[in-house]
Every structure is written in C-alpha cells, then in structure tokens.
Image (spheres, rainbow, N blue to C red):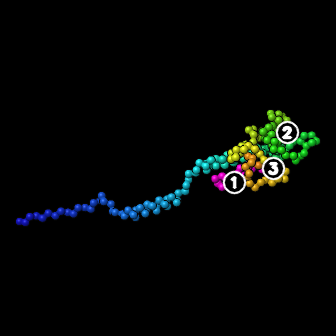
C-alpha cells in the first residue's frame, strides 16, 4: 500500500496588506487638494484694525442718524433748520447764521422762533433735541460743527477739521471724517 498523499489547501490571500500606492502619486494628490481648498476658502478672519474701522463706521452711522433726526425734529417744530439767529427787535437780520446758535437750539428748550432757555417753560416748549450736546464723531473724535455759509455748497469730500459739516439751508449733515468703512464707502457718505 502506498502512503496516502495529503493535499494541503492553499492559504487564503492575506487581507492585512493594502495595495501599494506610490508615495509620489499620493503626495501630489494631497498637495493639489490642499491648494484647491486654500483657494476656495476666503480669509474670513478680519484683522484687529479692520474690526476697529468697522466699529467706528457703525458708531458713525448711529451718531449721524441721531444728529439728522434731531435736526429734522427741530425743523418740524420751528419750520426752519437750527442755526438761524432768532429775531431780536429791529436789529434782526433774517438770514444771519451762527454755529453757536445751532448748538444752543439743539441743547436747550426753545420757543417757536428759536429763542432758547436752559429749562422748560410754557413759553419754550420745544427741545432739547440733543440733551448731551453735539455728538462726537467716532472716527476723528471731534464734537465740532462746520456750518456752511449762505450760498456755500456742501463739499464733495471731508477734510477732517471738524466732526460734522452742516448745511443750514437744507438741514443736511455729513461726517467730516477722512477714510473708508470696510464696505468701501467713504465715511463722508455715511
């Protein structure tokens, strides 16, 4: 009798060895994917300077709207814009303008002609329109006003010498601040 031949079945393929990919090919794929991601994702984090500029622009818009609203309220109560010197007897010049009167008429109680007193009286029922005074321009930090003279046009740009530019003929107010907000608009146009 012949010895029995035993057959050994072949070993199943090993699953522990992954197929090999050349490292250079994998490196190129990862590098290209990384570059595409860097190009696709914008730089979302603003710099500290940009954050301060945007904060100043927001504050500037709020202060400008507060000042414009006060001027509109004065106009509604008096039929003219603040800054006109009120009549005083026969020496009154009806077109005389004065920035000091603008501030007084905004901060104090007034009668229908624009005369002011520090406290509320039955004869002076209007105002105050700006109880804390002329707002500070948050960009150039000035709480001053440049009042345009009669017939003078509103400038086309800011020079930064005052906080605000005011046209008493129209009631228009512009921030007198040089620079731009993050959205590209000039502070002067806010």
* Residue 181 visible in the picture: yes
Front position in the image: 94 or 177: 177
| Residue 54 disc label | none
For marks 2 and 1 on the same chain, the one whose residue lies earlier in the sequence:
2
Tell me the residue at 72%/44% (across/down): 142
Whether residue 28 appears in magenta in the rendering, the answer is: no
Location of the N terminus (image quadrant): bottom left
Residue at mark 3 to residue at mark 2: CA–CA distance: 21 Å
Magenta residues span 167-190
Residue 50: give x, y in percent of width and height.
Answer: 61, 50
Where 25 falls versus 43 (above or below)? below
Residue at mark 3 to residue at mark 1: CA–CA distance: 20 Å
What residue would you read off at disc 3? 148
Identify the secondary structure beneath mark 2: loop
* Residue 65 visible in the picture: no
Tell me the residue at 55%/56% (across/down): 42
Whether residue 176 appears in magenta in the rendering, the answer is: yes
What residue would you read off at disc 2? 115
Q: Is residue 6 left or right of residue 27?
A: left
SS assignment for the magenta stretch, majority: loop
**Mark 3 or 2, which is nearer the eye?**
3
Front position in the image: 84 or 66: 84
Q: Is residue 136 left or right of residue 49?
A: right
Q: Are marks 3 and 2 in contact (CB under 8 Å)?
A: no
What residue would you read off at disc 1? 186
Q: Is residue 98 left or right of residue 68?
A: right
Identify the secondary structure beneath mark 1: loop
Where 119 falls versus 43 (above or below)? above
Q: Residues within 10 Å of mark 1 (few under 14, many from 20)?
A: some
Residue at mark 2 to residue at mark 1: CA–CA distance: 36 Å
Quarter of the image where one finds residue 63: top right
């Amino acid at each position: 009798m012949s010895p029995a031949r035993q057959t050994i079945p072949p070993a199943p393929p090993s699953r522990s060895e992954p197929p090999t990919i050349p490292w250079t090919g994998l490196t190129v794929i990862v590098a290209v994917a990384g570059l595409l991601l860097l190009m696709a994702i914008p730089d979302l984090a603003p710099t500290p300077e940009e954050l301060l500029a945007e904060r100043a622009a927001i504050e500037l818009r709020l202060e400008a709207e507060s000042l414009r609203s006060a001027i509109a309220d004065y106009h509604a109560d008096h039929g003219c814009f603040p800054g006109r010197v009120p009549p005083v007897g026969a020496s009154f010049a009806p077109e005389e303008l004065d920035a000091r009167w603008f501030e007084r008429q905004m901060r104090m109680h007034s009668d229908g002609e624009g005369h002011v007193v520090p406290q509320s009286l039955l004869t002076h029922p209007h105002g105050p329109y700006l109880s804390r005074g002329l707002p500070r321009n948050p960009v150039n930090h000035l709480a001053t006003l440049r009042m345009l003279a009669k017939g003078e046009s509103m400038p086309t740009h800011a020079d930064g010498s005052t906080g605000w530019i005011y046209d008493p003929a129209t009631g228009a107010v512009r921030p007198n601040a040089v620079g731009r907000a993050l959205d590209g608009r000039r502070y002067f146009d806010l």
